[in-house]
Image (cartoon, helix red, strand yellow):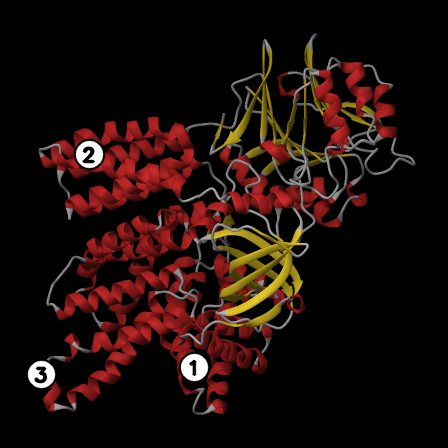
Amino acid sequence: MQLLNIAFVATVFGLALAPLGTFGLPFGGLVLLVAVPYLTWKRGNSHPLVLFFLFFLLANLRYPLAFPDRQDVDEIEALNKRVVVTATVTQVESLADGRTRADLRVTGVSLRDEALPLSAPFQIRLYIGAGNIFLLPGDEIRLRSRLRKPRLFGTPGEFNWPRQLAGQGIAMTAWIKHTDEIEVLGNKTNSLLRCLYAWKGRVATLITSIMPTADAALVRSLVLGEGRVMPDQERDVLASAGISHLFAISGLHLGLIGWGLFSLFSRLYHSSPRLLSWRPPQRVLPYFLVPILFGYLMLTGDAVATRRAFALVVLGATFLSMRYHINALQLLVSLAFLSLLLNPLLLWQAGWQLSFAGAAGIVFWHPRFSKLCKGRSVLLRYPVQLLMVTGAATLATLPLVLLNFHLLAPAGLPANLVAVPMVALLALPIGLLGMAVLPFCQPVAEQLFIFDGFILNVLVRFSEWLIALPGLGSHMVFLSRLQYLSIGLLVAALCSVATQPARKTLLLSVALLSFAMGLWLVQRGGSAAPLTITMFSVGQGESLLLQNDHGQTVLIDGGGLYSERFDVGERLVAPALAELGVNRLDAIVLTHDHPDHRKGLEFVLDHFKVGEVWAAKPLANLNAAFAAAVQRNGGVFRVAESGWSELPFGLGTPLRVFSPAIGRLSENDSSLVVFCGLNPDNGLLLTGDLEAKGVGILLQEEFGPVSLLKLPHHGSRHSATRQLIARFRPAACFVSAGFRNSYHLPAQSLVNYLEEEGIPLFRTDLQGTVRASFASDGWHFSLWENGLFR
């Protein structure tokens, strides 16, 4: 088992460092330097070291193989056109607001009635905006849509969506407005999975028809595993109370079903003397439960947590029948190791991380807190055990919850003391019983579902009350990777102390604790250069961060896609600031009140302390949501008067803001302009979304020099950019634009002009986040690639 642990740890390290590319190997060397003395000292030979090295290298090399290059998929992506897709449905899932998500196995693609060559079928994820759900696994369908390969925006701290989909076997994504655009050609099979989905659809339809939408979503989430149908408000309440895990299909569900059926079958088994004389029930009945539990696993979507629990049941039944005893923690490690060997990308799936970490935390701490409850009364023992189990799972998953969801929920412990018994002893059994009696007596099933919805509604209301209490409200926490790592090391140190009071264990705990504190205290918010500007890749929008070597920071705009389901501030800008070590902003500058520059700032204002906010208009004339966020933050709001203003903190050199006379100018031509003169030969000019009139007004001013220019209005051909180039002759330009945006920005004519003039152009749509650092010899550029600026 010791060798298994070494192989598992080596695999995790190898996979974790693999995304860094070639930079991961030096880090791997550092890991080996730390592992060598520990492993050889503990084992007294080199075999563990060799094993560690082999599995580390194997995992590191397997990572890129998980992203296969397919020329046919790349060619379909390059078309950037709507194509006709013939595919087989493999999975269907209901989403909130009447939307649907379906995974399809594509067998044919054609453009203008001409079939495109495919080397092999591939998986796509189809998002459907509205319409009645009628698809079942096995359906042969045809539709017309644009297929896209999932891609990163390219910002620090960004969630790796392409890797998430690759781990699920998804090569491309597609979207259609309505199910009416789908033509069903037939179905290949009447498989068990198809029957289960049909039954699931019937139950979901019944639940939705007999109770309010919010209550129906709660019941469907708890019983059927349809967590994505839950409205955002209820989802946020449950997450803030730290009990959303109870509404995800997990080991709790399988355990309750297994326990109930085992109790029922055991009574029947004991009524037969012949069976009892043959074999004891605990050696036979588990095998009868496996098919039932497997059916529920497939019915509820085959989630990672449920899969882990099912595997434990199968292995437990096998070991029980063989009278073979195995350590529960080692069994978990074995399952985790095996799953990573089969699919290395599971390491980055939040469900996989939380499932194994939570179970390991409970198994690890259970023998220790069981001693505290031994000999105590039932009334005292149960709440103490529940509190300790919840605390163990919370502690084990804390670093991963912060890493994946950036959420700290202080109400988790008290909420679970109420929620766990309510769900485990009332809501879940009632919901499962409703499903069981539905085929025989629908009215009874309806009443059970209605009562289940009432219980869950009470739980949500209780959660709302709890998180409203002082000190129990949730907090969004954005940290850098080093800080997340330090929290993980702190948890490891606490677990190490709890194992044995031996000297070497205490020394290891002290070392981990010291290292964790050192990582936490590392300050990375400043810049090593006198001035650094980072242009975040935020799609068709704009957001720039100015930093100096004194730790001062200014955020200019915050991006903002027009989609209401993707908050650029939450998903891109806030994680990027945290990854760069920025936890406070000296100022925010809103160049103009357009969504693609303003929307992302609302979340930043709610979750980062901001000294000042600058805009071209009074607060009352700005977007209401943005104005409310400014007031909640409590920072000083300033209106940039017509002409030049100087920001008081300066970033080491004067930071000047120019506001054109608003008057009859458009919103774009009223954009604030930021200029920073660095020395007689170098300066930075940020031009917002100025168009021809605004650029003309700016050029009437005396200022300069400009060695780095941000192209106005995302590189529009209507912004008189050539006049700026002719006057300042910058050494380089950069521009923020969305990948394949519908506006075709930056304009190809302008790109060609810059190329003719020999002026380098850095662009976020093709290169991701761009960083420019100023030094004595000019500007130095780097791009965010594979988790580092290179």
* Mark sitting on residue 38: none
Q: Is residue 758 visible?
A: yes
The amino acid beneath tag 3 is Trp
Q: Which residue is at 31% across, 53% downward?
A: 339
The amino acid beneath tag 1 is Met
**What residue would you read off at disc 2?**
507
Q: Which residue is at 53% across, 55% downward?
A: 124
- Label 3, label 1: how many angstroms apart (C-alpha)? 34 Å
Is the residue marked by circle 1 packed among few (<14), some (14-19), or many (20+) residues within 10 Å?
many
Q: Nearer the viewer, mark 2 or mark 1?
A: 1
Is the residue marked by circle 3 packed among few (<14), some (14-19), or many (20+) residues within 10 Å?
few
416 vs 266, nearest the viewer? 266
**What residue would you read off at disc 3?**
278
The outermost residue toward the right is 664
Q: Is residue 489 visible?
A: no
| Residue 543 point in image, percent of width and height | 65, 35
- Which of the two discs, 3 and 1, labels the residue nearer the N terminus? 3
| Residue 559 point in image, percent of width and height | 66, 40
Q: Nearer the viewer, mark 2 or mark 3?
A: 3
Q: Is residue 486 above or below residue 375?
A: above
Q: Is residue 135 above or below residue 786?
A: below
The outermost residue toward the top is 680
